Amino acid sequence: MTAIDPRPLVGEPVSLDLLNTRWTEEGVRRDLLSGVEGLAVWLAANGLGARFAADATTLRHTLTARDALGALVDRPGDSAATARVDAVLGHGRIRATLTAGGPGERFEFADPAWGPAWTAARDHLDLLRTAPDRIRACAHEACTLHFFDTSRNGTRRWCSMAVCGNRAKASRHYARTKEG
């Protein structure tokens, strides 16, 4: 049985969900991927648990992808960050297939331990194709979480309006009342 996912924000696309395995809680930095147990939680949360092993090698490769994606999100277009993500993508490929059900695709890896890392990097390519301007970091200065803005007008600022958005509003209110 897989442990409960302790992260405050889940359900984002797999590439951003990988970035969200690091977060701050009550001023303390937390990291879900500090061991293979946390990797198992993350794999299960993203529907990858049945396909990939939660072991030390997979964890090492997944952390490589997280660092590469984090650098790319922090510095879009940076050639070094782009090269790091491209290096992760070099460990897998998409093979076109034809089945009785019609055309399909199958992901292939020379080393299956790269599977989750490659899957997250590949997902990020899809986000960049879809709407790169909607890949966002939470606007709260103490938050490290990322999200894909699916709001109608594309103006979402917070990972969670109930948490970070509310904190920002409360801070502004406190500042106004303190001045007055």
Image: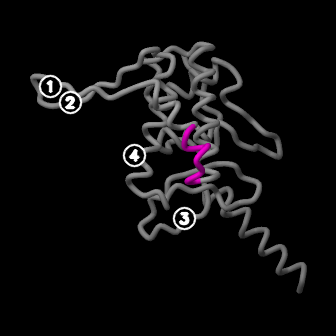
Q: What residue type is labelled 3?
A: Arg
SS for tag 2?
strand
Q: Count neighbours of disc 3 (C-alpha within 10 A) and say few if under 14, some if 14 to 19, many if 20 or more.
A: some
Would you say the residues marked 4 and 3 are in contact, meaning their CB atoms lie under 8 Å apart? no
How far is mark 2 from mark 3, CA to CA? 35 Å
Q: Which of marks 2 and 3 is nearer the N terminus?
A: 2
Q: Classify residue 35 by image quadrant.
A: top right
SS for tag 3?
loop
How far is mark 4 from mark 3, CA to CA? 20 Å
Which contiguous range is marked in magenta? Answer: 76-83
Q: Count neighbours of disc 2 (C-alpha within 10 A) and say few if under 14, some if 14 to 19, many if 20 or more.
A: few
Q: Mark 1 points at which residue?
A: 98
Q: Earlier in the sequence, mark 4 or mark 2?
A: 2
Q: What residue type is labelled 2?
A: Gly
Q: Mark 3 points at which residue?
A: 156
Q: How many marks?
A: 4
Q: Which of marks 1 and 2 is nearer the N terminus?
A: 1
